[in-house]
Image (cartoon, helix red, strand yellow):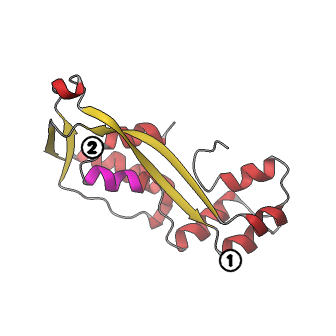
Amino acid sequence: MHTNDATTAIPRLMDMQVPNFLVGATLNMVIAQRLARRICRDCIESYEVPPDELKIIDSQLKTLKGSAAPAFKPRRLYRGKGCKSCGFTGYRGRIALYETLNISEKIREYIQQPNFSLDGIKKIAFSEGFKTMFEDGLAKAELGLTTVNQVLGVIKE
């Protein structure tokens, strides 16, 4: 099943006429993934993060998590310069960005209610420590595995 993220899989199942009680009783976990390009190991370089890039990241985090958005203030990130190994693109290979929604008892009880909402699911998930695909991508960008531009590009698809 295709959804933009893990939390929207629950209402999508119900759109497919799966009853609330059945989703709540049988669903244990939802995993969503996207593939981003991996920075070439042969031409990787670090750079100081410009303020405008930090503003874009901060804005995206606030859009996803509201006031609960974590601070992301790296001093340096990474990119590929381009070399023969990567065909002068700066990238070679792919890396997966994930998010995993564990269906806790609280979420299970909530989705069995007739008036549940996607926002309500997200609120519970975030209160239980749910990390978005974007957050996973930022962590991988900080490690030099991919770039913030790649993360932003695949998350918005």
Q: Is residue 141 above or below residue 70?
A: above
Disc on res. 157: none
Query: Number of callouts in the render?
Result: 2
Amino acid identity at mark 2: Asp
Q: Is residue 114 left or right of residue 140?
A: right
Distance between the alpha carbons at the discs numbered 1 and 2: 41 Å
Q: Quadrant of the N terminus?
A: top right
Q: Residue at x 48, y 57 (%)?
A: 132
Amino acid identity at mark 1: Glu
Q: Residue at x 82, y 63 (%)?
A: 22
Asked where in the image residue 29 lies, by quadrant, the reply is bottom right
Q: Is residue 40 left or right of residue 35?
A: left
Assign a secondary structure to mark 2.
helix
Q: Position of residue 134 (x, y in %)?
A: 43, 51
- Callout 1: few (<14), some (14-19), or many (20+) C-alpha neighbours within 10 Å? few
Question: Which residues lie in the magenta part?
Answer: 136-142
Q: Residue at x 80, y 48 (%)?
A: 15
Q: Is residue 28 left or right of residue 138?
A: right
- Callout 2: few (<14), some (14-19), or many (20+) C-alpha neighbours within 10 Å? few
Assign a secondary structure to mark 1.
helix
Asked where in the image residue 120 lies, by quadrant, the reply is bottom right
Q: Is residue 127 left or right of residue 82?
A: right
Q: Is residue 142 above or below residue 68?
A: above
Residue of label 2: 52
46 in magenta: no
From where the camera sits, is residue 114 visible?
no
What main secondary structure does the magenta stretch of the protein show?
Answer: helix
Residue of label 1: 105
Q: Position of residue 53 (x, y in %)?
A: 28, 44
From where the camera sits, is residue 34 visible?
yes
Does label 1 or label 2 sit earlier along the sequence? 2
